[in-house]
Amino acid sequence: MDVRLSNLLNSAERMLKDKNTSPADRKTTGKEAEWTAPAVQDTAEFTNQLTGKFQTIQTKLSELQSQLTKEQMRQAVLEEKSPKPDELINVLFGKEPLFPELQDNATVNLEDLKKTSQTNILALETQIRSKEVENENVVALGMIHNSGEFAKALKDLGSVSFRPLNENSVQKLIQ
């Protein structure tokens, strides 16, 4: 039996179209059915989906950049003049230890830590580049689809409103 892959794929696509389209979207004339384009998705809904995707990518980018900063700090500290493992245990990044593996085992080889850190930096840079490309694609799609509405949605995302600081709260934080 000679079945070509292209014929099989075309049949599968037709079956999916048939499954996904309602009878109102089909017009039958003669032997074959002609397909009309399915109803275009509401522009506002599409823009909202793209905006949500944009926000998700931005959040992931922020996380990746924070991880990259942490790994770069690890690399910089390890490249200092012969750091001692007992000193590295106390180094913090934010509120967490920069070298958590030293708390469990203070005899970890620092050269291995350097190599691991360098590998992590390269992997994070690759992930960041990938997310940036994905982000650019989402923005381009939004601008092609409906530039005015998408640009307004992105502008609304960027306008974070800050309320005035309470002087007493700031004073408590400083003390």
Image (cartoon, grey):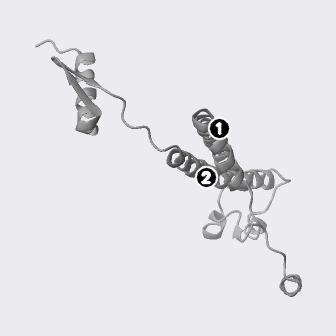
Q: Quadrant of the N terminus?
A: top left
The Cα atoms of the two marked residues, 1 and 2, are separated by 17 Å
Say if residue 119 shows up in the picture. Answer: no
Question: In terms of depth relative to the viewer, which is nearer, 67 or 58?
Answer: 58
Q: Residue at x 71, y 63 (%)?
A: 98
Q: Is residue 156 left or right of residue 169?
A: left
**Residue density around tag 2, few if under 14, some if 14–19, many if 20 or more, within 10 Å:** some
Residue 29 in view, yes or no:
yes
Q: Which one is earlier in the sequence, the residue at label 1 or at label 2?
A: 2
Give the foreground label among 1 and 2. Answer: 1
The three-letter amino acid code for the residue at tag 2 is: Gln
Q: Position of residue 15 (x, y in %)?
A: 22, 31
For the residue labelled by badge 1, is the local secondary structure a helix, a strand or a loop? helix
Residue 37: x, y in percent? 37, 30
What residue is shown with label 1?
Answer: 147
Q: Nearer the viewer, residue 128 or 165?
A: 165
Residue 50 vertical placement versus 78 (above, below): above
The correct choice, above or below, for 163 with respect to 137 in the image is below
Q: Which mark is residue 55?
A: 2
Quarter location, residue 77: bottom right
Question: Residue, x 28% and y 28% (percent of image)?
Answer: 13
Which residue is pictured at 23% across the width and 37% down the height?
A: 23
Residue at the left extreme, as displayed: 1
